[in-house]
Image: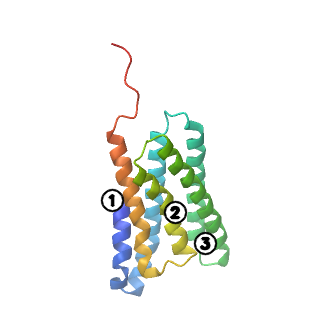
Amino acid sequence: MVGSAAFALVLLLSPALGNLRAEAVIGPMFLLLFVVVGVGVAAIATLLRRTRYTKLAGLASIGSLVGLVLMVVGLLTIQEFVGLIPMFFGLLVLIVALVVLGVLSVVTNVLRWWGSVALVTGPLFLFFAVFGTLLPPMHWLIGVPWIAVGLAVFLAAGRRTEQPSRVR
């Protein structure tokens, strides 16, 4: 949650930094976002561990982590046009996997509904920022859904997700 807030704040303030400083900060901020997303995916997979959808949640978590790795490879090779190919496929895999995790979290009532909606909209904001119509002054919006996901995971961890003991 804090990493997402830092990401959104830095991208919001990047026009004030100037072009040279903003370019030096934006790359590490995207890598920070990928770490935040990876931690969020792992936390949601842990919350879904004791449900009847454990295997599907595990596959979706693995798929989202593969999508994140492909996106990092795409970011590291972005100087050539070839870097857009793994980034595009990684983002598509990430979107599909996080939609599955969002639907599973709604069905099993692990996250609150707004956390699941944020989980689904997070990669869509990233897609529109990289390949679509989200203009650079609005790139700070990428971090906002991940702040909501972090808060939803934090609140879900406070609730008891295990069944109570039947031993008296």
Q: Name the secondary structure under disc 3.
A: loop
Residue in the picture at 57% in, 58% down: 94
User: Which is nearer the eye, 130 or 29?
Assistant: 130
Mark earlier in primary sequence (2, 3): 3
Q: Name the secondary structure under disc 1.
A: helix
Screen quadrant of the N terminus: bottom left
Mark in front: 3 vs 1: 1
Residue in the picture at 37% in, 69% down: 8
Mark in front: 2 vs 3: 2
- Relative vertical location of residue 29 with respect to residue 167 in this rendering, above or below: below
Q: Position of residue 133 (x, y in %)?
A: 53, 79
Amino acid at pointer 1: Val
User: Which is nearer the eye, 16 or 25?
Assistant: 16
Amino acid at pointer 2: Pro
Mark earlier in primary sequence (3, 1): 1
Give the quadrant of residue 87.
bottom right
- Relative vertical location of residue 159 with respect to residue 122 in this rendering, above or below: above
Q: Position of residue 44 (x, y in %)?
A: 46, 46
Mark earlier in primary sequence (2, 1): 1
Q: Which residue is mark 1?
A: 2
Q: Which residue is mark 3?
A: 77
Q: Position of residue 54 (x, y in %)?
A: 55, 37
Residue in the picture at 41% in, 86% down: 19
The Cα–Cα distance between marks 3 and 1, rounded to whole angstroms, is 28 Å
Circle 3: is it few (<14), some (14-19), or many (20+) Cα within 10 Å?
Answer: some
Screen quadrant of the C terminus: top left
User: Which is nearer the eye, 64 or 109?
Assistant: 109
Q: Which residue is mark 2?
A: 123
